[in-house]
Amino acid sequence: MYIFLTILILIAAVLMVLIVLVQKSKGGGLAAGFSSSNQIMGVRKTTDFLEKTTWTLAAVIMVLSVLTAKYTASHSTTAPQSQIEVQQPAPLNPTTAPDVTPTLPVPAETAPAPAQ
């Protein structure tokens, strides 16, 4: 599904590039060639059509991008795990763990003197 949505985004982007290239800056574009008033799509209708198509394609690209992001976030296979979590063992449960108290060496000054 991700690849299908990506292909649709690419097609919409290419169409949008073509539509924007057909338009003339600050109006006109293809409309400049249609000067007769009895055309089916006159000057004003051509620019309106190109502008509506541009906005529609922009909206389609945005919606498809959001769908692609939502689809990839909800279908991730495993959660990423840090190397620290992988290397360190899980802590033991204190109720089942054996009582291991560290024994510290007694310093020499406080050690009892040997009996003679």
Image (spheres, helix red, strand yellow):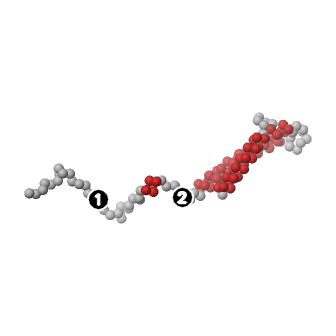
Location of residue 87 (image quadrant)? bottom left
Q: Which residue is mark 2?
A: 78
Location of residue 115 (image quadrant)? bottom left
Image x and y of residue 12, in percent: 72, 49
Residue found at x 66% / y 55%: 3
Tell me whether circle 1 and circle 2 mark residues in contact (CB < 8 Å): no
Q: Nearer the viewer, residue 91 or 116?
A: 116
Image x and y of residue 74, in percent: 59, 56
Helix, strand or loop at disc 1? loop
Residue 101 is marked as: 1
User: How many discs appear?
Assistant: 2
Image x and y of residue 44, in percent: 83, 39
Q: Nearer the viewer, residue 114 or 37?
A: 114
Query: As drawn, which residue projects farthest toward the bottom?
Result: 96
Q: Nearer the viewer, residue 90 or 67?
A: 90
Which quarter of the image is occupied by the N terminus?
bottom right
Helix, strand or loop at disc 2? loop
Q: Earlier in the sequence, mark 1 or mark 2?
A: 2
What residue type is disc 2 on? Thr
Residue found at x 75% / y 41%: 20
What residue type is disc 1 on? Thr
